Amino acid sequence: MHARAGAGYSEQTDSYQAGYEAAQAALAEAGAPADLALVYCTSKQDPHRLNAGVRAAVGDTARIHGGHSVGAITRAHLGYEGYQTCVGVLSLPGTDIHMFLERDLAGREMAAGRALGERIAAVSCADPRNLLLTYDSVRGRTERGLELNLATPLIEGIGQTIGTWPTVAGVGVFGDLQFNPTYQFFDHEVVQQTASALLLCGGVRMDTIIMHGCEPAGRYHTITKAEGPLVLEIDGRPAIGMIEQLLGAGSNKTWEDFPLFVTLGVNRGQRFGPFREEDYANRLCMAVDKERGGLIMFENDLQAGSEVQLMRRSIDFTYVGKRCDELLARLEGRKPFFALYIDCAGRAAAYCGTEREEAEEVQRIIGGRMPLLGMYSGVEIARVGQQIQALDWTGVLCVFSE
Amino acid sequence: MSDAPGAELEYYREQVDRLAGESLRLDYLVSALRHELKQKRQAFGLLVELQQHILTLSEISAVFAGAVRAVNSVLGMDRTLVLLPTDRAHVYRPGHWAGYREEAADRLRSATFTFPETFVDGTGHLLAHGASERTPLIDQLRTTLELPFFIAVPVLADAGPLGLFLSGRLREARPLFPPLDAGDLDTFRTLANFIATGVRNKRIVVLEQMDRLKTEFFANISHEFRTPITLTLGPLQSWLSGRHGPLPDALAREADVMRRNQERLLSLINQILDLAKLESGRMRFMFGPAPDVNRFIAERVEQFRPACDARGLRLEFAADERLNGADLLIDREQFDKLVFNLLSNAEKFTDAGVVRVTTERHADGLVLTVSDSGIGIPEDQLPHVFDRFRQAEGGAARRHVGTGLGLAWVREVARLHGGAVSVRSEAGSGSTFRVFVPFGRAHLDPSMVVDAPAADDPAGTAAMYRSEHRPSDFESLNDDGEAAFDATRQTVLYAEDNQDLRAYVRRLLAPMYNVFLAVDGLDAQEKIDRYKPDLVLTDEMMPRLTGRGLVESIRADPVRRGTPVIVLTARSGAQARIEGLEAGADDYVTKPFDEQELLARIRNLLRARAQEKELTELNRVLEARVEEQIAKLRVGARIQSDLLPKSAPVIPGYEMAGRTLPAQVVGGDYYDFIAVDDRRYAVCLGDVAGKGLPAALLMANLQATVRGQTLWNPSACDCMTRSNTLLFLSTDPGRYATMFYGVLNTRSHYFSYTNAGHNPPIVFGGGDRVSRLSVGGTVVGLFEGSTYEEDVVHLQPGDLLVIFSDGITEALNTAGDEFGDERLIAVVAERRAESSESLVDGIMSAVTLHARGTPQWDDMTVVVVKHCP
């Protein structure tokens, strides 16, 4: 018995129908019953009805894991900010599937991470060990404004208790770019403010690679003052002022243009070595605190002393092909049967101003070889250098092989 | 001199920063430009898509339906609507939309919005973004359409807006969703103009096609009419000539009416056939020399002299003698018709003054001018005066009935003579038509030119195009009707401009009704005031005021608006019928009509109106009675509401809450909390059989009885037994109630209760433990000697007592499923940590959610008692 997989897509506005239709399409492509269904949909769908629709198609025994996404990607479809739904089904004979859920994530990411790590470590898990982390990116809106759950402490918490990390990829789920509350699918439950882990033990192997196509522009700058995700000063100057000065007074850019445009990169490789894409963890500016002159980043890992570089985004997507080839070369003769693409929502053409979708390159290269399931995320998680890292503006490609 | 190393380093740092900034700026610029280019491409793609819609779809509604979807998907809008005009000026309602869930459809369909007048002339627009000024209209649109940021522009056609485009976003957040601005407004204006132009062009093409098809159809059908007309006209003429001997007078009069109308019909058909031939180029002209054109025209002018004299009009003819012997070629038969039509129009449309005909020799041809001092033509209708089937409107209605073919014919004949016709006119001051015919033959088809002049047949032409103008004696029109007036009969007024038809219908109706006549709509208005008819029968197409105008005026008159009206018309087809009925007519009969049908319709309408009057009176009486009943019910509801506890008692260590939702204004459920002393509280919930006022009164009785008995002896079984006896004695046989009654000792936490046929309340204990309180007896009020058992439960901290009426568990949803005990238990189990008040809310919400709007036939009451942990 071999592993089989398929991916289905739907833009039905009736959420039950959307879930059912996408799951049915995935089952048809897989040609085998589902042991696991990965489900992603936008915030326009009713998650309860959608989950019921998927369940009706995949049956009572299949595990369901997934959550919100700004859009959906399969071999033949790509769309976002509508009613996009995608379902991947995997038939995994010989692979043990474990799922863990930690509730009440908001404000206790580190504790939730530790608990998750303990539960994962407690499982007797044969190699290869593969871990897919999912958490709600949006904590909610308070009188202080929008608040996000942070991946960095979550990862740190897991790291404290998990022992040896499995191969890992992760998603901070987003349902739209209005930062509406997010949902996750966890078997029969539709949950919020949780972190969940899908652990696949033995049988299949997941290989991952990051790609962002960003290159540093200019020298290293040092963050000299930060509070949580708020970067207040860079090189001893107010962060907004510093960025404005760098872009130049005549650039016609104001602080209102910074969100999702200013990308800071952290080099986890050699400080003055040759550029290696896989060494850079990108951090995207989510919003601007104009009163305090700070940049609000998607994560809180940029603290005083962090060295960052302003990153230029590539409009040439040839890097995608190269990175995909690198990943496939790592399979060492194993047979790939499914690909999961976790893509930063900001990289979608409508949001970053590119003419084409970079995910179309993934569709072209990977989709031609195996079933592809893709989703648009708020935060991505993958290994960068020696660290498991929360990432922005990054695509994490995961290929499953046996 | 060399710089310090620090300065050099600083120099290079600045250079690197400058270059970094420069490259980022360029990135941003390129990105923005690419984005803009993409948007432009998308907009262009949208226009192409719309073009396809317009070309392939025949209905504007389909174009709009496609457009709203395309705008959302291509321009990245969240919601787009087309608001369509309504019958009310400046009021629009959503007709097409995209981006809404299905549930919103009813709400959208029923919404209306009043837009400023500027939306009609095309200058209006709305641009609602975060910083834009709020207006009542913008607020209404935002709220009703659930669309905070939007643009609205009109899609204008010639006659006003086809609709309004309204499109927008749910959020405004830089940089992804910047505020809608003037650029977006331009895009939507372009879009609206594109649709309007496309629709207009398509309409022109379609209209031209329809026009051609219509002419062909008329020509074909008219040709088929000629044979039967000839076969009826011939014998009629033979009878009237006396060939078969003299006819009786009455028969001769009717035969003459038939002949005249058959001749008129034939004349109209010949005009249609000739025009169709002319336009298709199938009519063969024979142009011959006309050196005597002045004499030729003079003869036609003289034919109109008797008609003009009879109406007191001066008829003048001035000929340019230089035309005698001119090298002018005309088709005498067709040119004759041209002159006839111009003269006929001048005579018809002139009430006083002069009709003047002149000929002039110009350097290159003849100019024939026919002018009059008549009613003239309004400026806006001048461009259409030579169109087929057009007759200028003069105020409220057409002045004279006609086919509208005459001037179209004139234009075609002039054109085929190589010439042209023009008009100058001013409303109220008369009209001047000038026909130019060039000299020579170079402009003519040689195969249609003959050298010898053709013979004239002016009498034949005149006969064929006989004027139907037969002045009526308005004053004497109703002399017969007034003389024969019978107050015991109902009165019918008939408005018709055709004298023959008036006479015919009068003969038909006179045996049953008083019949009065009017010659047109205006005349009918006067006659309605004078004769106060019970029913008005009217022709549709009449001079001065049409039948539709008459109907509208009747409906607008507060005194006469109830008068039934039947429209009698030659126009057939569903559309004509709909238009007539929409104008306010009660019935619509097409010509030719069946006599018996017309009589039956008149009879039915008069009878229906009489019944309607009776019903109106009956309704008035019924409404008064219903109002009276409602007032009583309101009193009952108020009484019932007053009887229910205003609030739950505040008891340390306990929380109590209760609520009732009556299925009708007045329900039969009640609950009560009664303080027995400082430690004991009675809790009861009753459900009286039946609904409405009687049930409420019994409920009030029950409540008073129970309260009294509680204070006398709070023992549950004693209280219930005595209450049953008292109720049995004081209520009608067959009336009863189910009831649960218990007394809580808040110190010992024992709850003693008895259950009189009521749904067993549920005690939620620790863990999943659930028990029912069912000990008691039968219902109260039905049997005199009923007795009741009592039981006691001990409420532990955290225990929860839920008492409910069967309206809760038997609440149905649309599928007919009951809410049921299981759902109730599940809701309580899930929310048992909440306060009693919140739990009551939760139960009621769950039941309401389950019912999903299904009407409920039973009251719903729930009481919760919680021993706080």
Image (cartoon, grey):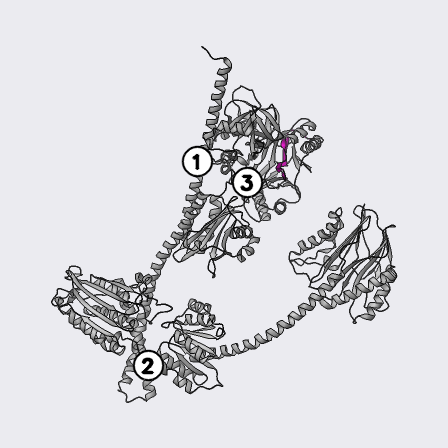
Q: Counting other residues with Cα less than 10 Å from the Cα at mark 3, is it few (<14), some (14-19), or many (20 or more)? A: many
Q: Nearer the viewer, residue B609 or B787?
A: B609
Q: Earlier in the sequence, mark 2 or mark 1?
A: 1
User: Does residue B454 appear in the picture of this structure?
Assistant: no
Q: Amino acid at mark 2?
A: Val
Disc 2, SS? helix
Q: Quadrant of the C terminus of chain A?
A: top right
Q: Nearer the viewer, residue B98 or B560?
A: B560
Residue picked out by circle 2: B257
Q: Amino acid at mark 3?
A: Gly
Q: Nearer the viewer, mark 3 or mark 2?
A: 2
Q: Amino acid at mark 1?
A: Leu
Task: Name the residue at 53% across, 28% down.
Answer: A241
Q: Which residues are magenta?
A: A124-151
Residue picked out by circle 1: B33
Disc 1, SS? helix
User: Does residue B319 appear in the picture of this structure?
Assistant: yes
Residue picked out by circle 3: A71
